[in-house]
Image (tube, rainbow, N blue to C red):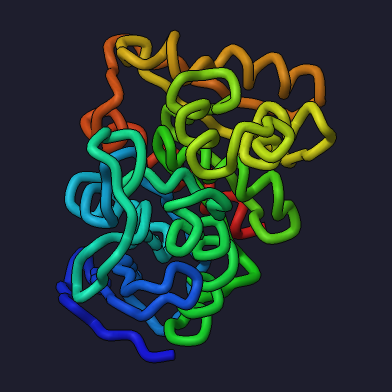
Amino acid sequence: MTIETVSQWKSHGGTQGVHRHKSAATGTDMLFSLFLPEGEGPFPLVTYLSGLTCTHANVTEKGEYREACARLGLAFLAPDTSPRNHQGNEGVADDEAYDLGQGAGFYVDATQTPWAPHFRMWSYVTQELPALIGAHFPLDMARQGITGHSMGGHGALTVALANPDRYRSVSAFAPIVAPSQVPWGEKALTAYLGPDRAAWAKHDAVALIEAGARLPDLLVDVGEADSFLETQLKPELLRAACHKAGIPLTLNLRPGYDHSYYFISTFMPQHLEWHADRLRR
């Protein structure tokens, strides 16, 4: 499968690229960004899954990860959050609301009309994209970590819990930890997977942990001034589930910080150091 390099810049001695390819999973063209540090590699890889309304560009432009990645020798992958009607794509379903449709794929494989033909982001981020970049770039796919923000934090947790042998390190910024129990998740999972809550379970981090899924340890940062803290994020549910399961959880509640990239970029270096330490082992 071919990859088109859309743009490329030198940064912190390494290379920041944005790339396009034809996705078999979504049936559309997809964009992703990839930072490679200086050197020949192969480099350990941290994948970052973005939140509602975002594309690959939000973290690429505002995440402030490149200095830390260059210093730590990490590659950093940022896929899009959904298929889209762009780059010649046609017929991708959408919704007027910001929390459903394009920009809101929720990292599931949709089974319901009109989403099922293209909204297959679970297959895209867990199978197709890793295989693609592993074949085309100098990456050590035996040393992978994953992180994400909000909806992408939900994606990072569920992907890691479902693939415990793939990811050596897992973290999240303000994740939706129990989508089955909050409005964002209930709306999206109903639309994409249907009303049967049993079908939602593998896309709910708290439910997965309660069912026996495990991680070696976990780092989560949430802003105490996050307007979504009590209604959508509910980190206390993750704390309780990890405590009962014996999963070591570092949960940092950051005073004064909100849900924005000002928050994410502040603590990004600490998260990347967390990943680097575990990817060296």
Q: Is residue 249 left or right of residue 32?
A: right
Residue 187 visible somewhere in the drawing:
yes
**Quadrant the C terminus occupies:** bottom right
Residue 160's x, y, as percent?
A: 64, 48
Residue 95 vertical placement versus 248 (above, below): below
Q: Residue at x 26, y 35 (%)?
A: 98
Q: Is residue 111 left or right of residue 28?
A: right
Residue 170's x, y, as percent?
A: 58, 44
**Residue found at the very far right of the displayed protein:** 212
**Quadrant the N terminus occupies:** bottom left
Residue 238 vertical placement versus 224 (above, below): below
Q: Residue at x 62, y 43 (%)?
A: 158
Residue 30 or residue 39, whichever sits in front: 30
Q: Residue at x 42, y 58 (%)?
A: 72
Picture quadrant where residue 262 is located? top left
Residue 243's x, y, as percent?
A: 75, 18
Picture quadrant where residue 227 is located? top left
